Image (tube, rainbow, N blue to C red):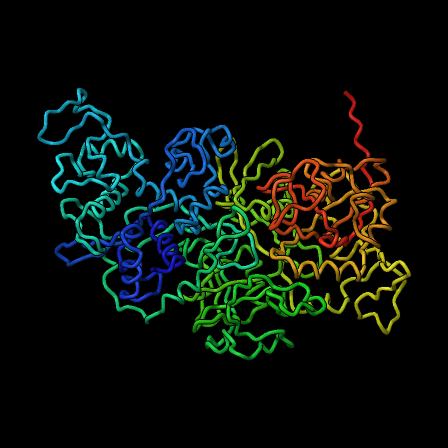
Amino acid sequence: MADPEVCCFITKILCAHGGRMALDALLKEIRLSEGQLREVLEEAGPDRFVVLETGDKEGVTRSVVATTRARVCRRKFCQRPCEDLHLCKLNLLGRCNYSQSERNLCKYSHNVLSEENFKILKNHELSGLNKEELAVLLIQSDPFFMPEICKNYKGEGRRVICDKYPQCERLHICEHFTRGNCGYTNCLRSHNLMDRRVLAIMREHGLSSSVVQNIQDICNSKHSPKKHSGHRAPPAYRRDPAYRGRSKSRDRSFQGSTEFLSSASAPTPKPCTPAPNQIGHRPPPDDVPVEDLAHKFLCLGSQDGPQPSPVPPQADNLRGREQAGGSQRFSENGSPEDLCYGDQDSASDVESTGSSRMVDCGSTEICLDHLYRDCQVESCNKVHFHLPYRWQMWIANTWMDLQPMEDIEKAYCDPQIRTFSIGNKNIDFQKMTCNFNPIRRISTPSSVTELTNFGFATKWIWYWKNESDTWVEYGEETGDQQALSINSSYLESIFIRHPVGVVPFQAGSRSYELSFVGMIQTNVASKTQKDVVRRPTFMSYKAVEQIKSGLSCQPAQTPPDPLSSTLLPQWDFDSSGYELLEIDNRCPEYATISEYFKTSMKNFKIEKIKKIKNTKLLNTFERKKMKMNNRTEKTLFYATSRIHVESICKNNFDWILHGTGETKYGKGIYFTKDAIHSHKNCQGDTKNIVMFVARVLVGDFTQGEMGSTGPPPPPYDSYVDIRLNPSVFVIFEKNQIYPEYVIEYTELDKPCVIS
């Protein structure tokens, strides 16, 4: 059986090139020998790939066409469960009358990656495809996308019953042939989709001749008596051995710390396939085991919830033209030893926490605890590294560190830089490759989700490209640009929660939509589009060491003893067993927490932010985390009266003492993603409300039940308001909670409006 990840990657390449490629052109993209590729195609079978041979004066040309058994449900009202995709056919064809902002008005779904659709795509091993690539695949594989077939057509040589012939607007072809189940070797109904009249109707329906040719070849393969791949296609229809169409696919965004293709990188150049005379034959590359290819594209696996899977390094922008953009060259001798260090560390690394050779075991996140004070978890499954980012290249069946790492990171953080070179090694941030080798960037979690160990969480900045081809940060005011209603922190928080969403926003009187899938900003009125990118904020090695030593900020307290000024804050515990320390408002930790708070609390002013230190509660929390099957942790808000601060800091949350009385989703502690939600639900005088920021182990969650007095039954750990993208989490066991910050705040005076 062929490796599913390799098959998905090959399908993605083919669909990015219109669903079909010459075998030689495909070989150049996947770095496999011809024998290995043919073995994969044969094992996958004609249900995934149709291999064709066409002969002409110049010789035999082999082509590969992508296909699938996945289908779109034809029912207007489907009774679940259903094994088919539930999508708007016209939307995939680009003909739906409802725009992206009006998609909720359409009775058919426009969400390719809904929870139900994602499961079906995963079952068909297609979870790595984006919307455009999936559309290419379905249109040429699913007969549902073809125009209606005439029911009165009985076949050639018979009496024509159709009274509208030859003006009939329906197809006069064999319906069983299009479905792949025609049992007649010499069927009287036409199997020729390239017939002039049939092709005219297909074109009117939005299907180009190249797409129809792909459909023809897929149908021929199903009707052919040969059961193996490599059959010879009928020579009656003129075909182009090279690329037959292009898909306007763009980079996909994704959530996570591993970047094979930068999650919201610069816009993808359109595929540019060589002309037929450029393809030719070439010596096969060195043999690369299929297992290695699969290993390179582990990012095709699914993520938590109905989210798009990360795409492999060479899936999009294949054969791409270089766009106008910056590049940067660093002076190096270009030797492999200088580019990738084996078991030795870079001289500039000073004291690396791990070898530069790393066997990939699924780790996609750098451990924050290790960076801050050394991780105490013996079986920690996160990457232990001395920087909050790590660049690596796939060489000799292992990931090896890419040097000079700090220079690479600095270049990547600049949205103007698309490519740069180290000696004879060219690094492309769009394709995430170093020459032909895949590269990756792993990092700490996003700062909007990790408030713990504040200094090392990755702060992402969102940019849009203006008319001068300059990248402008969202929220940054420019002279000729009206103020935007959003900024980077707002976009990042939405992106983390719903990476396939569309964000509406305003710039003065103008309305815009930002699509995370296409990384495109669209003017709703004029339909003008601007490219969007997402890049991290640069942190040097020196800055990392300063944070580690505590030089970057100190809590707002009595000036420390000079001898200990370079040490981390010393916590003095009283008899209560906890300590509250106010954080200086100049400290990055303060900025991170306040930014997270103000995402929803626009009309409020922060007076103080205090950090809670309670070793007993923290140890209990960590022990609970180690015992859980699903260790998903979230940073959530809880608003309560000031009188409860001491008891919560000392003994944690208690539903009887601190509960809001809410029972809609169970009798537990109600935490919220947005601070404003918790603030509004808090009873009592608003002047005496404080906001707790807590680490919460939500684990596996399910829909809450009214009046439930205990935790949900196994395997669930918490209740939520809604399973898909929940905003409320109900926790029953306090060892799943660690209160970490207390925010004191006041509401700003509302401006007086005279009517």
> Does 44 sit left or right of 254 as displayed?
left
Relative vertical location of residue 235 with respect to residue 568 in this rendering, above or below: above
Return the residue nearer the eye: 625 or 533: 625
In x, y percent, where is residue 240? 22, 49
User: Residue 171's image quarter?
Assistant: top left
Q: Residue at x 77, y 53 (%)?
A: 739
In x, y percent, where is residue 304? 55, 51
Can residue 320 be seen in the rendering of this structure? no
Q: Residue at x 78, y 25 (%)?
A: 753
Return the residue nearer the eye: 582 or 588: 582
User: Residue 377's image quarter?
Assistant: bottom right
Can residue 295 be seen in the rendering of this structure? yes
> Does 603 sit left or right of 79 as displayed?
right
Q: Residue at x 22, y 27 (%)?
A: 150
In x, y percent, where is residue 421? 48, 67
> Does 75 sit left or right of 417 as displayed?
left
In x, y percent, where is residue 459? 64, 55
Q: How many marks?
A: 0
Q: Residue at x 33, y 65 (%)?
A: 32
The quarter of the picture where the N terminus appears is: bottom left
The quarter of the picture where the C terminus appears is: top right
